[in-house]
Image (spheres, coloured by chain):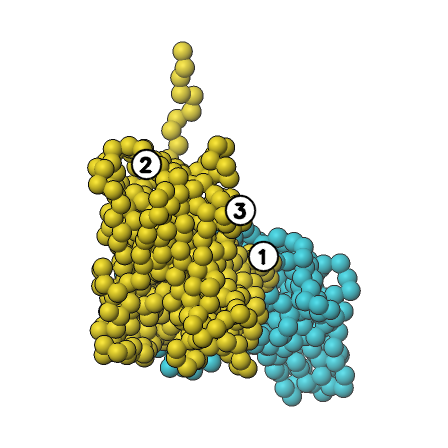
């Protein structure tokens, strides 16, 4: 039997309600919002983001058909929500239910016109990987050569609508055999080029939503390359052969920059031993140019180059275009493009204002001894630092979130009205760009706060933060330094965090000029993590100093 | 109520400067304790250590038996005013008090109460940057009173106050002590505390020199002495010693008498028929006693920490020997 041995003890009358940290948060928030200058500066910072983002001049496009929207058709949207180029020559027939296609490829050849038609136009950026060899043997009539990403092979596609889901096994001009699906996925298979002496066997099998790709050097021993899950693949799909070849990017490097011009190219694949299994209609092959590249005047079944011819067992398919995600800036995509984050160019300006406020939120404590009032009221120094960080982080996050949530969609609409083609992205990506911008600003503010606690002097802290975040960002995006130096800056400094604004990733399977500011050297979250690392380190130093120092 | 401050053996150096050198004292509730010493004596440092703002190299400072940093809502235990210039100039007085109130879980009603207590209600929404130093002192005192604490510490609260403010402040401090609160008020001018403090902690060079009631220091300083000028010193001395006074010849025709008020001296001499030219009660000056004490702080610093009464005896002897 148990019994209570001691009488219940009345707990001392401690007023109920918020925790100590909750009270600290409330106190620091009151401290922040009751200084009009700080609130005003935060609003100005947010306004700067929008003013620059919405009124930045976007170049209007002109072409033979007129200007602006007349010059392009919107690019198709891929299954992932991003803009894609989906133009190729398709030799197809329907396949109902599960089945497979097997072919042998004996050659992949290419052709492009050598003389760039227009005078070189200066472009932002400087160097580009030597993706487009200037063939020494070029002649006035053109050059017989494949592009590195010229493709021909077999494909299973949901429909002939550009942008629809697909999976393909393809030979390429310079990257061996690949399995690619839904525009953004790319897996390497057999290495080496296709030739009569070294033919390659390709196979795609469809089972429900799953398409599996195989390759083989002899048609006997098969190797699985990859398995693609194509959500919502219809019961009847189009299966067949294809060929396509991206525009040639000719980059001329010169002092102080480079220029790039594009010209189209074609690829021709030669197939035999074509074997279809599964429920086909028996109607045989139909040849069709799929035109989904947004080029001026492009019409389905129009003047899109491409053809196929049969000679006994052999089928030759010639096509032009690309099956790939669209990328902004100078690329092999024929449509003039912009990215949604082009409307966030005001962030660095707004950021200056916001980090100054954040630094002052710390250094104002030390100006006249306010820190002694603060720490007498709230002796938990680590928690005071945490409360200040939460308050300044939340305030700047909210301001930047509102600003970015206006700048991105409204800016994109304004740009489209002016004739720029703003590449659409998936909803989650757009949300990541907007929320990520707010996170970027908030983490920069916390970094500035920590630097303020460390240095204790307003001018010194502001200088340190501007030199540490804004200057490297400008060095990174303004094409004054070599690309390697700019990328290095954007990899190792807090400015790496700006990567979170990038909406279109680098694609290994798309030839483009991948340089800042359109492309950051680190992925969005990796770049953001670098910034967070700086902020965490600064907070740790600030914490140790705040605890160790006399107030 | 009834919370005391206990400071024991505080030592602290700033570089090569010794700020605190074994500072030890206790501040009791129900009276105004003056914390007096020249600039640099360690008053502010001691207060910062009590508030957990500065870390001592050795020693402890407790409020009601607890470290300040361990107090859950510190402003309801200790109210303090260290520097009247601390509030940010761009923030209104009321908002300065608001964030402090929020840090303690208090509301705007308490803020308005303390603003009223210090007479700043009319200026509450003005920016603190436009305040006179006297108004800032009042704002600092309002902040100290927010949590209605039993212990209050004010560092140089008379600084910058006009005469009217000083009178108000004296009454205010008295009222706090009469409530039973522990009130510690620092000043480098004894005169400011003379009419306010019941008790005095006199410090110099980082240590306590004297811990005494104001009345005792006054008595010791003056010793109720009377100076007498007479043409017949031996007859006067004999008559006064018979009446119970102690008499010291202080050269020529003057005698210093202790133990009898001036009126009695006149009565005794008249009754005895001794002629005298002048009888004067020596003016009791706290300021002088304080100056004597602090001037000697170097000498005392070489000895083991003196008890308050020992220091006082020293001081008295020194004064008498002059």
Label 1: few (<14), some or many (≥20) within 10 Å? few
Name the residue beneath numbered marker 1. A544
Same chain check for tags 1 and 3: yes
Mark 3, secondary structure of its residue? loop
Cα separation, mark 1 vs mark 3, equals 69 Å
Of the two numbered discs 1 and 3 on the same chain, state the one appearing first in sequence. Answer: 3
Name the residue beneath numbered marker 3. A197
Is residue A377 visible in the rendered image? The answer is: no
Label 3: few (<14), some or many (≥20) within 10 Å? few
Left or right relative to A202: residue A156: left
| Contact, mark 3 vs mark 2 (Cβ under 8 Å) | no
| Pick the front one: B77 or B198 | B77
Cα separation, mark 3 vs mark 2, equals 24 Å
Question: Which is more foreground, mark 3 or mark 2?
Answer: 3
* Chain of the residue where label 3 is placed in the rendered structure: A
Q: Residue at x 51, y 78 (%)?
A: A257
Q: Position of residue A82 (x, y in %)?
A: 32, 56
Q: Quadrant of residue A331?
A: bottom left
């Amino acid at each position: 039997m148990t019994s209570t041995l001691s009488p219940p003890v009345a707990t001392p009358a401690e007023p109920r309600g918020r925790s100590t940290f909750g009270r600290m948060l409330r106190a620091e928030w009151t401290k922040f919002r009751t200084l009009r200058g700080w609130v005003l500066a935060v609003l100005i910072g947010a306004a700067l983001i929008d003013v620059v983002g919405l009124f930045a001049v976007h170049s209007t496009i002109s072409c033979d058909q007129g200007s602006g929207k007349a010059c392009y058709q919107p690019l198709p949207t891929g299954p992932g929500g991003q803009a894609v180029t989906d133009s190729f020559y398709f030799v197809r027939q329907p396949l109902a239910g599960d089945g497979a296609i097997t072919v042998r490829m004996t050659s992949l050849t290419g052709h492009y016109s050598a003389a760039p038609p227009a005078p070189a136009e200066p472009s932002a950026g400087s160097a580009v990987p030597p993706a487009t060899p200037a063939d020494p043997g070029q002649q006035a009539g053109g050059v017989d050569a494949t592009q590195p990403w010229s493709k021909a092979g077999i494909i299973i596609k949901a429909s002939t609508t550009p942008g629809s889901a697909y999976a393909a096994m393809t030979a390429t001009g310079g990257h061996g055999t690949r399995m690619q699906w839904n525009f953004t996925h790319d897996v390497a298979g057999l290495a080496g080029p296709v030739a009569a002496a070294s033919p390659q066997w390709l196979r795609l099998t469809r089972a429900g939503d799953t398409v599996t790709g195989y390759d083989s050097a002899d048609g006997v021993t098969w190797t699985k390359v990859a398995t693609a899950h194509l959500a919502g693949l219809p019961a009847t799909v189009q299966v067949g052969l294809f060929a396509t070849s991206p525009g040639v990017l000719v980059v001329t490097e010169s002092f102080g920059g480079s220029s790039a011009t594009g010209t189209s190219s074609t690829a021709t694949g030669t197939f035999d031993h074509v074997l279809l299994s599964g429920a086909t209609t028996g109607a045989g092959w139909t040849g069709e140019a799929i035109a989904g590249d947004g080029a001026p005047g492009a019409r389905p079944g129009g003047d899109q180059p491409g053809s196929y011819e049969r000679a006994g067992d052999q089928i030759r398919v010639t096509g032009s275009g690309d099956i790939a995600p669209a990328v902004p800036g100078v690329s092999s995509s024929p449509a003039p493009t912009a990215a949604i984050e082009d409307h966030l160019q005001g962030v660095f300006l707004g950021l200056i204002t916001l980090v100054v406020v954040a630094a002052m939120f710390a250094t104002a404590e030390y100006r006249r001894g306010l820190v002694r009032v603060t720490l007498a009221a709230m002796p938990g120094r680590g928690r005071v630092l945490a409360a200040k960080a939460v308050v300044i982080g939340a305030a700047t996050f909210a301001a930047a979130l509102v600003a970015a949530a206006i700048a991105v969609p409204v800016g994109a609409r304004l740009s489209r009205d002016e004739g720029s083609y703003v590449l659409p992205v998936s909803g989650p990506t757009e949300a990541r760009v907007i929320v990520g911008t707010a996170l970027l600003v908030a983490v920069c503010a916390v970094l500035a706060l920590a630097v303020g606690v460390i240095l204790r002097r307003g001018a010194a802290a502001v200088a340190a933060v501007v030199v540490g975040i804004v200057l490297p960002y400008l060095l990174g995006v303004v094409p004054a330094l070599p690309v390697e130096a700019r990328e290095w800056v954007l990899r190792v400094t807090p400015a790496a965090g700006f990567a979170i604004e990038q909406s279109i990733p680098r694609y290994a399977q798309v030839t483009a000029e991948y340089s800042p500011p359109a492309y950051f050297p680190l992925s969005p979250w990796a770049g953001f993590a670098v910034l967070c690392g700086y902020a965490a380190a600064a907070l740790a130093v600030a914490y140790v100093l705040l605890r160790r120092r006399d107030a | 109520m009834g919370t005391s401050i206990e400071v024991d053996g505080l030592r602290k150096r700033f570089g090569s400067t010794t700020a605190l050198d074994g500072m030890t004292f206790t501040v009791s509730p129900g009276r105004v304790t003056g914390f007096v010493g020249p600039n640099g004596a360690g008053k502010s440092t001691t207060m910062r250590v009590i508030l957990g703002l500065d870390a001592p190299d050795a020693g402890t400072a407790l409020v009601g038996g607890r470290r300040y940093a361990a107090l859950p809502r510190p402003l309801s235990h200790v109210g303090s005013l260290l520097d009247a210039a601390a509030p940010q100039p761009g923030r209104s007085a009321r908002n300065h008090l608001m964030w402090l109130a929020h840090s303690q879980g208090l509301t705007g009603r308490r803020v308005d109460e303390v603003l009223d207590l210090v007479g700043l209600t009319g200026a509450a929404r003005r920016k603190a940057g436009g305040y006179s130093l006297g108004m800032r002192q009042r704002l600092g005192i309002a902040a100290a009173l927010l949590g209605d604490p039993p212990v209050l510490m004010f560092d140089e609260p008379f600084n910058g106050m006009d005469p009217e403010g000083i009178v108000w402040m004296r009454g205010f401090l008295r009222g706090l002590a009469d409530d039973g609160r522990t009130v510690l008020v620092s000043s480098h001018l004894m005169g400011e505390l003379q009419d306010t403090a019941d008790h005095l902690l006199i410090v110099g060079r980082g240590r306590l020199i004297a811990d005494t009631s104001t009345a005792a220091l006054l008595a010791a300083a003056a010793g109720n002495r009377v100076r007498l000028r007479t043409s017949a010193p031996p007859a006067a001395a004999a008559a006064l010693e018979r009446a119970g006074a102690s008499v010291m010849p202080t050269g020529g025709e003057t005698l210093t008498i202790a133990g009898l008020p001036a009126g009695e001296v006149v009565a005794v001499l008249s009754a005895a028929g001794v002629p005298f030219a002048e009888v004067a009660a020596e003016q009791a000056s706290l300021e002088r006693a304080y100056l004597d004490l602090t001037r000697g702080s170097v000498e005392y610093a070489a000895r083991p920490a003196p008890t308050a009464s020992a220091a006082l005896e020293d001081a008295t002897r020194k004064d008498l020997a002059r």
